[in-house]
Image (cartoon, grey):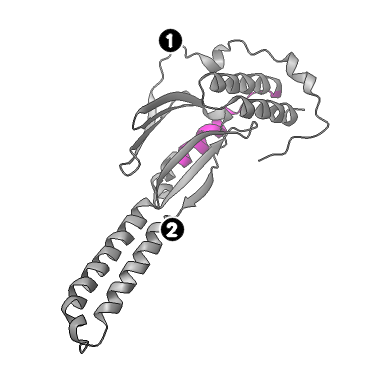
Amino acid sequence: MQAIPDDLDYTQAEHISLGEDPSVDQVDSAKPRSPDYRLVLTRPSHGTEQTLTLYDDGSVSVDERKRKTHKKYTLHVRFLDACPEVSRHIAKREFITAGVTAGLGIGLLALPMTLGGLEMWRLPIGILLATTGLFALLLAIYRTGDTLRFASLHGRVPVLTIRGGIRLQNRCDELLQKLFEASEDARQETSGDALRAEMRDHHRLKQEDVIDAADYEAAKLRILSAHD
């Protein structure tokens, strides 16, 4: 994240209006937007479904369903950093369980055949453990996944998080390319206009509970610093 300078003049924030801006918060009814691209990501193991729709007016509709919760909001591409932070979650416990159980099962199956009474249960227990280890390995792979976090352009706060399996980046290649192209086309305005519009957009996202109050205050200072 971009550091907040110590010598920043906080009083500049008082000169920025957070009122309505038709160019940001409202869609011109005479020019209805049309979807250019839609991506649906589901993770049954987490009970989540996320639908991302990129429109021709440079906006992205985000529809997130997580079992009992549902959130829907809109992002403006010109205020979005199209290069996300990528991280991977590895299901360590499942991988450890898979290794231990499979190792014990294979070890039992590899024991010498002349073990007396041990021979009666060695084979079925070994097969059971090896099979359990295989299922644990498949579960570990299934629960391992990638996360893409998109931050706002100058505010540098997370405004969009996409979670999926280990092939998430491949599935999002086309979306990333379209976001990059749209963001390059959308940033054709003066510095002063960009400052006011991006500040208003962060204020809207705070009101919609996409970002919290602390992130909003930090974003506000970063935006002011970026447009000095």
Q: Relative to 159, is 167 on the left or the right?
A: left
The residue to which callout 2 is attached is 92
- Amino acid identity at mark 2: Lys
Q: Measured from the top left, where is residue 122 in percent x and y?
A: 21, 77
The reply to whether dot 1 and dot 2 touch (C-beta < 8 Å) is no
- Magenta region, main secondary structure: helix
- The tag on residue 29 is 1
- Quadrant of the image for the N terminus? top right
Q: Quadrant of residue 13?
A: top right
Q: Is residue 183 magenta?
A: yes
Q: Which residue lies most toward the front here?
A: 117
Report the residue at 31% width, 69% height from top.
102
Report the residue at 21% width, 81% height from top.
118
Mark 1 Cα-neighbour bin, 10 Å: few <14, some 14–19, many ≥20: few
Residue placed most toward the observer, 43 or 170? 43
Q: Secondary structure at mark 2?
A: helix
Q: Is residue 34 magenta?
A: no
Above or below: residue 41 compared with residue 208: below
Report, in whole angstroms, how far the alpha carbon at label 1 lies from the one at label 2: 51 Å
